[in-house]
Amino acid sequence: MLAILVPSDLEAQILTDLPGEAVDLGGFSGQRGQLYLALICGVGAANAAAAVGFLVGRFRVDRILLVGIAGAYPGSGLGLGDLAVAAEEVYADLDGMMDLGFPSLVAGGQVYYNNFPAGAWARQLAGAIGAPQMKFLTQDRVSNSELEAAGLARRYGVAMENMEGAGAALAALRLGLEWAEIRSVSNPAGRRDRAHWDIARALGALRKAIGEILALE
């Protein structure tokens, strides 16, 4: 079964056009259709990882798709409403683990520190929706300024900032699941003035992408 995670009630608006019914899953609310199960996982990497574990414990889930809005870093080439698929998630909060020799995960014969690459399914989805694959950054806070965002982009070579991706990726890899992440740009990373945001446009792009993905099921 395909499991779709959305971080918030705001992003759950993209599910309203999908065939299915609202469900209460013991602490998680969401929607269930014939081809998918969608959950509102909550904001942050810990919530995303917990939702993956919950799904695997209760349902026959084999693929995790995280969908949400995000900030685009300077130099990414992405504009408001543009879609991108994660080629890799970098977890900024685990930076330095390789130097210390402490992996965050050993699974499938691979050792992971704070970089979690996506696989063939993510590449397939990127082709299906006509979106580029790019490197994303997860941290448990948002950039406070454009200067900070530009520094993160340079340091990690990333295009989008989010708060859940690495948690979902790590949990999926640990449990042997395929995972993918699709984000739409709602704002420039580090810019708090909402006059420069377009959440409605970003949600519209995600809604269209989800419809195209379910058409493949």
Image: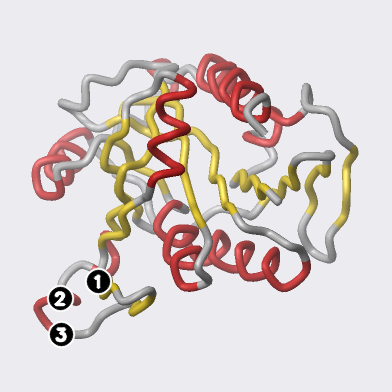
User: Residue 55, which numbered label?
Assistant: none
Q: Is residue 20 left or right of residue 28?
A: right
Against 76, is 168 above or below?
below
Q: Is residue 213 above or below residue 122?
A: above
Residue 93: % across, % down = 29, 65
Residue 189 rendering spot, x and y as whole percentages? 30, 33
Q: Residue at x 36, y 33 (%)?
A: 71
Q: Residue 131's image quarter?
A: top left
Give the Cα distance between marks 1 and 2.
6 Å
| Crowd around label 1: few <14 · some 14–19 · many ≥20 (10 Å) | many
Q: Element at badge 3?
A: loop
Q: Which residue is mark 1?
A: 113
Quadrant assignment, res 134? top left
Q: How many marks?
A: 3
Disc 2: which residue: 98
Amino acid type shown at disc 3: Gly
